[in-house]
Image (spheres, rainbow, N blue to C red):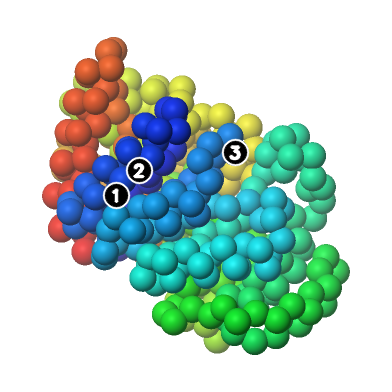
Amino acid sequence: MRLGVMIGAERGDMARKVTKLVADIEWAENAGLDTAWVPQVPNDFDALTAVALMGVKSSRIEIGTAVVPLQAQHPIALARQALSVHAAIGGRLALGVGPSHHWIVADMLGLPYQRPAAYTRDYLQVLNAAVGGPGPVDVENTNFTVHNPTVLGADSPLPVLVAALGPVMLDLAGQLTDGTSLWMADERAIGDHIAPRITKAAENAGRPAPRIVAGIPVCLCGADEVDAARERANQILGEAEVSPNYQRLLERGEARDVGDLCAAGDESAILARFRRFADAGVTDLSVRLLPIGETRDELVASKYRTREVIAELAKEIR
């Protein structure tokens, strides 16, 4: 299992965010992490722009989006942007996409959110053809009629991952992409539901074994602070639980909220949790650093302690 870190979800003004993105990717690469994942927060920095910025400040680490909502742009436009970024950073982009949630697509963007799985299938047919260029992109399906020439093509493989939680989406992910990018999935949900379903779909489609990227909060703390860490996870990360998609996924596992997903405790406790995810079938773990404390100084100190442990654990779980 490869270990990575989420970068870019923290709040802050734009000037400081750019500086922080660069500092964080330089740390992740120097710490020996395998991957960095940039969430596309609805009201924040553009994820692919962040990838490009961090890519020119690093040389080895894979940088992915987790995830870009599909409905916000045409698949040809997304393919063009992704291929450009992939080339700019030396072929290290992993493009994570997904149909998002009703509260983003319908409530925030005012776009239709009917039959998201069918829309994703149609979108991926166009996206895959465009990413597989150069050459003509000729795709006609229910949602798209595309006849678009392109001179762009990836010199090295550009992995495409799709956020897939339910059975239909997991089938699509296995059939049409290189894997899935997850949030709110615990070990049981992955081992009993996600990994078997997507792996079987990939096998049936004659595709390689899929990547399963799981995002979880992580906090290095004492045993007497574990409950506080889980409470903080619920406070700052719990809004996603309003999504029916996540609620159905939680029902397939043992976690009842994002606090239950948090790997909290000392180094041995965190490592044990990481290994349980690996045993469930996770190929890539994406750590969301979760600091605890009453003051800004305490939060910063907590974050740096957790980072140091993550760097050490990356050597042990490979």
Mark 1 falls on what kind of element? Answer: helix
Q: Are marks 1 and 3 in contact (CB under 8 Å)?
A: no
Q: Quadrant of residue 55?
A: bottom left
Q: CA distance from mark 1 to mark 3?
A: 22 Å
Above or below, 295 relative to 105: above
Q: For marks 3 and 2, give the CA distance.
A: 17 Å
Distance Cα–Cα, label 1 vs label 2: 6 Å
Q: Is residue 314 above or below residue 204?
A: above
Circle 2: element type: helix
**Residue drawn at x 53%, y 36% as measured from the top left:** 44
* Residue toward you, 192 or 152: 152
- Is 140 positioned to the left or the right of 100 in the image? right
Residue assigned mark 1: 25
Q: Count residues near mark 3 (Cα–Cα under 10 Å), then give few for <14, some for 14-19, many for 20+.
A: few
Q: Residue at x 45, y 78 (%)?
A: 157
- Residue with the mark numbered 3: 42
Q: Residues within 10 Å of mark 2 (few under 14, many from 20)?
A: many
